[in-house]
Amino acid sequence: MCAGWAMTAMTASAATTRVTFENGNQGWVANGHDLPDATGGNPGGNLHWANFVDTWGLELRTSSNAAFLGNLSRYGNQITMSTDVKVFSILNFFGNPVPRNVVIELRDYDNPPANYPYVSVFKVLGEVTGSFEDWQTFSVTFDPTSAALPAGWGGTGAEDPTTFEPRLAPGRTFANVLAGVDEVHFSTMEPGFAYVPSFFDIAYDNVTISTPGVACDNIDFNQNEVFPEDQDVIDFFNVLAGAECPTGVCNDIDFNNNGVFPEDQDVIDFFTVLAGGEC
């Protein structure tokens, strides 16, 4: 056995898409504004809304950046979405600061109920005061395969007949909304609430969707405690071809544990890790 090797699972880097506004807006707009500033972000580029016309609220949204849309279960059972926010001011008609919540909302426009343009799920991520606040990150981690609404989440597409608050449409679940996301919003407006027009001066940066890394199996495929060795390679290919494991305790052929097997990527990742690379 080579002393330089350790029999541990190798961990892949997290899959991450981050919009830094260094290369355009990449499908994200703030109330229609889509021209990033080159400086002043966290760091560098950012999308800065400073149009001093009063409006009900401010929404950073995308309906075209594919990394944030579609069937989010393709990422597995854990996703984190976040954005950095810098508040210069949120002022009412009298020039007084107005606090607002920061809300994430994921919308599905397909087959909405009568009188509704879409069905969505949403969560309040925190609050900004309306006075100057430097960059801060608002984020949420969730399981897109969960049928039930996670704690703190709400839904739209129907209305509670007693409280008149929005609720998820009948027949819809958290998972099936997230199986067809058409738009993602980071908004100052929470569904079910009415707002007085205010003047917003807010910048956004580092809009991110990320998933945790996936652990590859260790390179001692046949679990005989001798590694690295040619026999691990031989046994890996034999089991991949449908043969029995000679030791009876081989790892499975889904070497990269991505739930897809048999596939060429398992072979590629096996040899990459065998050579000392990352999973």
Image (cartoon, helix red, strand yellow):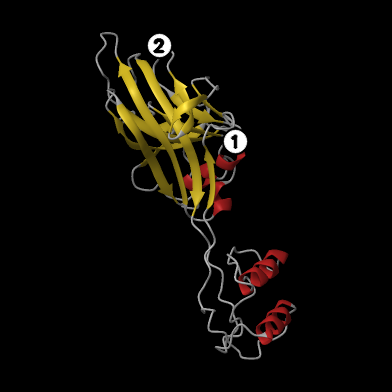
> How many residues crowd mark 2 within 10 Å: few (<14), some (14–19), many (20+)?
few
Q: Quadrant of the C terminus?
A: bottom right
Q: Kindly identify which residue carries mark 2.
A: 52
Q: Is residue 20 left or right of residue 263?
A: left
Picture coordinates of residue 39 (x, y %)? 47, 27
Q: Secondary structure at mark 1?
A: loop
Q: Residue at x 59, y 32 (%)?
A: 23
Q: Residue drawn 61% across and 82% down? A: 228
Q: Of 88 and 245, which appears nearest the observer?
A: 88
Q: Which residue is mark 1?
A: 65
- Could you say which is closer to the camera, residue 55 or residue 143? 55
Rounded to the nearest whole Å, what is the CA distance between mark 2 and mark 1? 28 Å
Q: Name the mark on residue 34.
A: none
Looking at the image, tell me whether mark 2 or mark 1 is earlier in sequence order.
2
Between disc 2 and disc 1, the foreground one is 2
Looking at this view, name the residue that lies furthest to the right. 241
**Residue 253 found in image quarter:** bottom right
Residue type at mark 1? Answer: Asn
Image x and y of residue 222, in percent: 61, 85
Give the x, y percent position of residue 221.
61, 81
- Of residues 96 and 40, the one nearer the viewer is 40
- Looking at numbered disc 2 in the image, what kind of residue is underneath it? Phe
Viewed as shown, does residue 19 lie left or right of 83?
right
